Amino acid sequence: MELKWVDSLDIALALIDKYPQQDPLQVRFTDLRDWVLALQEFEDDPNHCSERILEAIQQCWIEEI
C-alpha cells in the first residue's frame, strides 16, 4: 500500500509497528518527518509536508496507542 501525507492514520499505524516503544508526545516534528519519509510504503513529495500534517499524524498515533 502506498502512503501519502494525507494518510495520517495509516502512517501512524506504520510508525507504531516500526517504533512500538516510542512515545509520540516525545517525538520532535523534524524526527517525525524523517521517520515518515523513511517508511518503505511512503511515496509522496517531501515538500508537501507541513506542521499541520505532522500534527495530524501525531494525533492519530496518540489515539491508537
Image (cartoon, grey):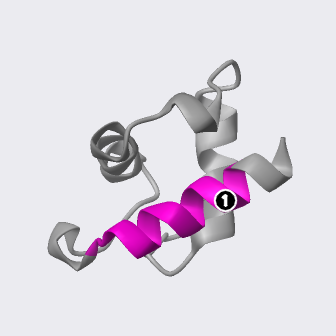
Residue 41's place in the image compared with 53, above or below, is above
Q: Residue furthest left?
A: 47
Q: What is the chief secondary structure element of the magenta stretch? A: helix
Counting every numbered tag in the picture gives 1
Residue toward you, 28 or 40: 28
Residue toward you, 1 or 34: 34
Residue at image location 53% in from the left, 29% down from the top: 26
Residue at image location 38% in from the left, 37% down from the top: 28
- Residue 39 lies in the magenta-colored region: no
Residue 57's place in the image compared with 64, above or below, is below
Instruction: Name the spot of residue 36 as percent of width and height, x first.
Output: 40, 51
Q: Secondary structure at mark 1?
A: helix
Instruction: Name the spot of residue 20 as percent of width and height, x first.
Output: 70, 25
The residue carrying mark 1 is 59
Q: Amino acid at mark 1?
A: Gln
Q: Which residues are magenta?
A: 49-61
Left or right, 15 with reference to 35? right
Left or right, 20 with reference to 8? right
